[in-house]
Amino acid sequence: MPFDFKLPDLGEGIAEVELRQWLVAEGDHVAEHQALAEVETDKAVVVVPAPRAGVIVRLHRQPGEIVKVGETLVSIADAAELTAARPRSLGIVGSLPDADDLAPPAPPEEFSGLATPMVRKLARERGIDLRSIKGSGPRSCITPEDLDRQPASQGRPLPTGQPLTPEQPAAAEQPRGAEQETFAWDSFGPVERVELRGLRRTIARNVLVSQRTAAFVTSMEEADITDIWELRAREQGEVEARGTHLTFLPFFIKAALHALREHPMLNASIDEATQTIIVKKHYHFGIAVATQEGLMVPVIRNVEQKSIIELAEAIQELGRKAQERTLSLDDLRGSSFTITNYGHFGGTFATPIINWPDVAILGFGRIVERPWVHRGQIAIRKILPISLSFDHRVTDGAEAALFLSKLLRSLEDPGLLFIEGN
């Protein structure tokens, strides 16, 4: 009998996943540990590998479905199981062996890379050997555009203007989530219903947990960061020559680190079971990243050990992985404090939601030019809006104000970021 592969326990208390896409199709030969599917957990997109080699007999679930741990994902059969399951010809003199039983052909060398079922089907229709293509997608996954770039002599292109058939699903080319959209009418006019799925579903659950658990308070301030602006402008060319884009965020992270060292209760969490405050002696900062599918918060570990340039490199790499949805579970866990830069999108002040179980989140708004009193004179300066949301169960407004005061000193005099060490 074929082997029924059930969704394994992925750890982290994950009870269910959403099937994002199959990386194989029914009838494909797969090797042991070859990627079978991408699934989305509460934290990241995870590739599920094949537990054994064989032929894909049946895909039990469709992309977009929720699969619980222990439910069957796919059935895989080896050569012996396929032979045992194949019907034999019967005649008046008994059974006759099938032709392939007499001379079993050597299995063809199979493509073992990443490609969606739709891409594999298109490649078969056009006569394109996927083994000859280097994919341009995440983890070298082959995309339909990669097929389109192949020379005409390598395959048979589909006739232009040919309508899509049920075997050529348009949904595979639509943006993620489009297949869950339905249009209807209510008593006031047309409406659109979009299922709460994937990352958006996870975000909705997590922010509700945070709002229902923490006692939120938000304090706001403004900082004159003209000196940081000029410092970044002077050094940006040299840093970018090394392949790294220098933003303001590494400076903000350093300033937050120095403030947390003086006010450690904001670098903490609460053990709800024992009602104990856990003050972290490490500094792992979650950095909110906006993606097309929603907000993700990858973690930069050991901020205190990194220079401004190393922080810029880490931000750039985590941002790339977030956009490509290649973050691992380890990239998304263990933060002790969170920073969000909504000013990148034009926001000024906000009341950011705490990234539970952290007890504080620091938000930065859009930098604007404003008249400002500087050394006793009115001048046009670069002003940064700041918002700090914290859990009032852990600390009070006085300590939050002192934290922001220390933060402002470091932002307004960036020399302190280096004089005071990492």
Image: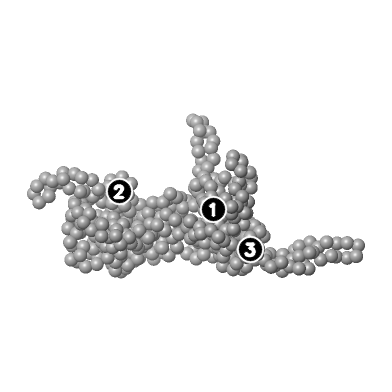
- Which quarter of the figure has residue 238? bottom left
User: What is the C-alpha distance between the residues marked 3 and 1?
Assistant: 24 Å
Quadrant occupied by the C terminus: bottom left
Q: Earlier in the sequence, mark 2 or mark 3?
A: 3
Towards the viewer: 6 or 344: 344
- Image position, residue 308 (x, y; %): 27, 62
- Image position, residue 375 (x, y; %): 9, 51
- Which residue sits furthest front? 153
Looking at the rendered image, the disc whose residue lies closer to the viewer, 2 or 3, is: 3
- Which quarter of the figure has residue 306? bottom left
Quadrant occupied by the N terminus: bottom right
User: What is the C-alpha distance between the residues marked 1 and 2?
Assistant: 43 Å
Give the amino acid type for the residue marked by disc 2 in the picture.
Answer: Gly
Q: How is the image coloured?
A: one colour
- Image position, residue 339 (x, y; %): 32, 56
Question: Which numbered circle lies on residue 29?
Answer: 3
Residue carrying label 1: 150
Looking at the rendered image, the disc whose residue lies closer to the viewer, 3 or 1, is: 1
Residue carrying label 2: 343
Above or below, comparing residue 134 to residue 156 in the picture: below
- Give SS at disc 1: loop
- Image position, residue 235 (x, y; %): 23, 58
Q: Residue at 28%, 45% (x, y): give it.
A: 348
Give the amino acid type for the residue marked by disc 1 in the picture.
Answer: Gln
Looking at the rendered image, the disc whose residue lies closer to the viewer, 1 or 2, is: 1
Give the amino acid type for the residue marked by disc 3 in the picture.
Answer: His
247 with respect to 56 (left or right): left
Q: Residue at 69%, 68% (x, y): give it.
A: 106
